[in-house]
Amino acid sequence: MSQTADVRLPSLLTAATPQRMIALVVVLAIALFGIPAILSTFWMKIMFEMAAYSLVTLGLGLLVGRVGIYSLCQIPLVAAGAWFSLRVHFLFDESVPFPILLLITGVLTGVLGIIIGLPALRLSGLYLALVTLMAAGAITLLLVSVKFPNGGGGFWGFDTRSASGFNSVPRPGIATGDIAFYRYTVVVVALMFLLAAWHIAGKPGRAWASLRQAEVTAISAGVNTTLYKLWAFALSAAIAGVAGGIIAAGNGVTTNQFPVEQSILLLAVVLLGGAYSLWGAIVAAFFLRVFPQLLDKQLGLPVELLTVLFGVGVLFTLMLQPKGVVQDLTNLGRLIGVKTGMIKPPVAPVVASAAVETAPVAEQVPS
């Protein structure tokens, strides 16, 4: 069997060491209580967007890092999730509880993801990326044509007498305020990350790993490639749909809020953050929503500079660090932990040099 480069794919469950669990609890505590205590109203809005879009980067990271499928349809799926949440909300006379609304939105968007994933059964690589990009254009054109539902009759639910292009879903009763809904979003995001980690640690994750390494080998091993490819598309789309429902309730949505070209930028930040790690989705969401504001508000640099920076970052990632920025952050955290004594330094393996020196020459040189 030929040896190939092994890229380990860690998850929140498969490597649940005490140190990692402590780090997870600390991150959640900072996100829930530390950040709202120190940031202004403007930056809390940006942090909410980062939390919501971490689901979008998570869904694309599952396809790219776990299955090896490159999709350019994630942003329009977010728009579709927002449309589904608004349509269900108005269809049932605003009586659906918000958690149930998110669940229905995720299921409907997952079905749409299965339809988009059908070409993946026959195509791969650049051809599949182009097909998903065309599907993204079709979804965007459709949503712009029919606009987002605003309570009107019919299937599309849009009332032409309404001049407003802004629509939103009411927030849950326990999280009507901005900070409360931000914390609500963080909890939902944590649950979705655990759902993704559960998939990765189980049978779907093993099937996706075999598909990513070699589809022919996976088929010979008895993996149902049709099932698990569509499963990956459905899960990725469902996560994006939940993000769309959250955005519709958090800041509201408009018809031109989700342009197709953002899908290319999304793929760039996912590769830059780290597609092979669930933590990389959070780093990618930081690059997508927070980093542009830091350039604009804090440094006074033009936002257009992002295109250059992300291009250089992706080149660096592809050539020198395939695991993304999250791997550099992991190495830095491990170094700090070793220096402070929180982490034991790795022990180098003992080489049996004496046995090698006394071994016959004929045994040292393979035949």
Image: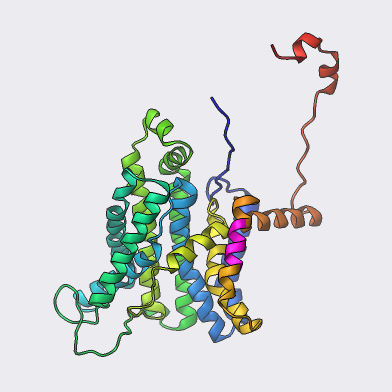
Task: Give the image location of residue 49, x and y in percent.
Answer: 48, 74
Looking at the image, which residue is at 64% across and 54% down?
Answer: 327
Name the residue rendered at 42%, 68% in the picture: 261
* Residue 320 as seen in the image, left or right of residue 235: right
Q: Is 79 placed above or below 14 here?
A: below
Viewer-proximal residue among 217 and 18: 217
Extreme left residue here?
A: 154
Give the total number of marks visible in the rendering.
0
- Please, which colouring scheme is shown? rainbow
| Image quadrant where one finds the C terminus | top right
Q: Position of residue 276 (x, y in %)?
A: 54, 50
| Front one among 159 and 26 | 159
Q: Position of residue 119 (x, y in %)?
A: 30, 49
26 vs 291, nearest the viewer? 291
Q: Quadrant of residue 237?
A: bottom left
Q: Confirm whether the magenta stretch covers residue 9.
A: no
Q: Which residues are magenta?
A: 309-315
Q: Main secondary structure of the magenta part?
A: helix
Image position of 330 with respect to 181: above or below:
above
Q: At which x and y percent is residue 341?
A: 79, 53
Residue drawn at (32%, 66%) of the image: 137
- Residue 229, can we see it? yes
Position of residue 145 relative to residue 8, above or below, is below
Q: Is residue 188 visible?
A: no
Q: Classify residue 302 as left or right of residue 166.
A: right
